[in-house]
Image: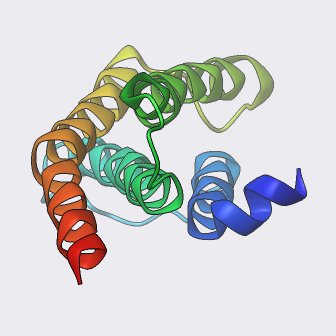
Amino acid sequence: MLYYIKKYPLSLIIILAVVYLSFFKPPSVELSTIPNIDKVVHVAMYFGMSFMLWIEFLRTHRSAMPIWHAWLGAFVCPILFSGCIELLQGYCTSYRGGDWMDFAANALGATLASIIGYCVLRPRMIKKRRTVSYK
């Protein structure tokens, strides 16, 4: 457990923040002027979580770690985590309801972050690794 705290500190903080935001009772605020603002928040939360997992994975595992570990930890796990959160909201709270569209927004956020992490961040980290090793 201490290994994960040392290697993924920001990711763990973001995961704790997502858990808190998922279960606290929000104040009643009129946000009806922006349609589907809660879906945008869901996309942003899970984009941030997944993207930070990608960043810390690529930073931590500079050696030949199989990339499927990153896909599993930074894409599949956040989606499964969001499904569990939505089920817990639906069955364990009276003020929150598990919503399939929230789950779809969560999956969209993790998907966008994983695409950016794999196609943009990973090549830059590999390029940075090569230039550092030649000096």
The residue located at (32%, 36%) in the rendering is 110
The residue located at (60%, 35%) in the rendering is: 96
Instruction: Identify the residue at the far front of this view.
Output: 134
In the picture, residue 92 is in which quadrant?
A: top right
Give residue 10's quadrant in the image: bottom right
Of all residues shown, which one is farthest toward the bottom? 135
The x and y percentages for residue 50 are 40, 46
Question: Looking at the image, which residue is at 71% across and 24% down?
Answer: 88
Residue 55 in the image: above or below residue 83: below
Q: Quadrant of the C terminus?
A: bottom left
Q: Can you say whether 80 is above or below 55 in the image?
A: above
Indicate whether 26 appears above or below 110: below
Identify which residue is drawn at 57% across, 59% down. Answer: 11
73 lies left or right of 41: right
Question: Which scheme is used to colour this image of the protein?
Answer: rainbow
Q: Could you say which is closer to the camera, residue 71 or residue 20?
A: 71
On the image, the x and y values in percent for residue 102 come to 37, 29
| 80, above or below 46, in the image | above
Q: How many tags in the picture?
A: 0
Image x and y of residue 111, in percent: 24, 31
- Taking the view exactly as shown, the residue that stands out farthest to the right is 1
